[in-house]
Amino acid sequence: MHALADGWGIRAAALSYAPVGGGSYHWMARDEQGEQRFVTVDDLDDKGWLGRTGPAVLAGLRAAMGAAVTLRRDAALGFVVAPVPARDGQTVRSLGARYTVAVFPFLSGVPGRWGELPSAPERAELVEMLAALHRVDPAMLVPSLPPHEIGLAWRGDLEVALRELDQPWDGGPFAEPARSLLAGAAPRIRQRLDTLDRWAGNGAVAGKTVITHGEPHPANVIREPGGEVILIDWDTVGLARPERDLWMVASDTGDELRRYTELTGRPVDVAVLGLYRLRWALDDISCFVRDLRAPHRRTADAEHAWQSLELTVAQLTR
């Protein structure tokens, strides 16, 4: 509560934890006037795609949140959920040496669920949103966003895990099951890593880049009671080929990709779609393996990491 008062002048009358989403900690705050806001606390040690040191991750997070503010305010993209700047103008404020806090408008809509296939009209809406985002000139973002790297957030951790499959993993109750699962899938995972490296090395993702969201999956799409569709979680925003976003909305019919080309005049490279799809699966594996090799207990988060690792490995190796 002190962070909200000091940073935003918000005197919270009530603060309740919201066990939603992943990768961050969330609270719902109600001030003395009854206005609600959504408060997010991030762990700087757990955002490897933004950097390897606390200062680098903090700078990356501020750049991403600043981009969200610019996209909503200056590019007039109403579907972008941007943070509320603090009194000093910062979108993200430090909370000790390891954590940060940000404040967002409270949304009353309900998000979709990861893994669900949205209806054709919903996919069409999302394609129109992505086309509008991709048409924004990256030069309007100050400071500019860095190019999104095709590599994995925790590639080093995954490589170490693959080298230590013949040693016990003692991080917690899911460590040994994770080792056994990875041992059985190791040859295919190494093969897929080689494929990713080969495609990246051949310049498969070279070419004109656009502003991409990075994770436009159903869990990040919220439909408000009035019917407005909005896109949340902009900490993964980055400059990349549009296929970084499009693989998540493409169905087997190809209708979404044809519509995207109609809206932007830009053809979609199916091979690059496949590269980003592969990269996503390997990145998930690197994250889940890192979590399950680290000290952990039998918690809901650990259960989720284990189940997600099982599912991702099965999909990648079938």
Image (spheres, helix red, strand yellow):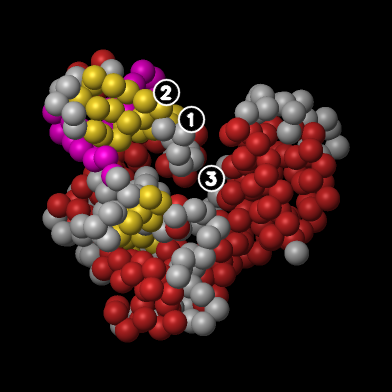
In the depicted view, which residue is nearer to us: 18 or 96?
18
- Of the numbered discs 3 and 1, the one sitting upstream in the chain is 1
Asked if residue 145 can be seen in this view, the reply is no
Amino acid under disc 3:
Ala
Give above or below for 79 relative to 29: below
Q: Is residue 224 visible?
A: yes
Marks 2 and 1: CB-CB under 8 Å?
yes
Helix, strand or loop for disc 3? loop
> Sequence order check: which comes first, mark 2 or mark 3?
2
Mark 3 burial class by Cα count in 10 Å: few <14, some 14-19, many 20+: many
Disc 1 on helix, strand or loop? helix
How far apart are the alpha carbons under marks 2 and 1?
7 Å
To which residue does mark 2 refer? 98
- Secondary-structure class at tag 2: loop
Pick the residue in front: 1 or 90.
Answer: 1
> Magenta part of the protein: which range?
84-107
Magenta stretch holds residue 88: yes
Residue 5 found in image quarter = top left
- Displayed quadrant of residue 238: bottom left
The answer to whether the residue labelled 3 contacts the one labelled 1, judged by CB atoms less than 8 Å apart, is no
* Three-letter code for the amino acid on which mark 2 is drawn: Arg
Residue under pointer 1: 45
Residue 245 located within the stretch drawn in magenta: no
Measuring 28% from the left and 21% from the top, which residue is drawn there? 14
Distance CA(mark 2)–CA(mark 3): 18 Å
| Coordinates of residue 119 in the picture (x, y in percent) | 45, 70
Q: Mark 3 = which residue? A: 153
Left-right relation of 304 to 179: left
The image position of residue 13, as x and y in percent, is: 24, 19
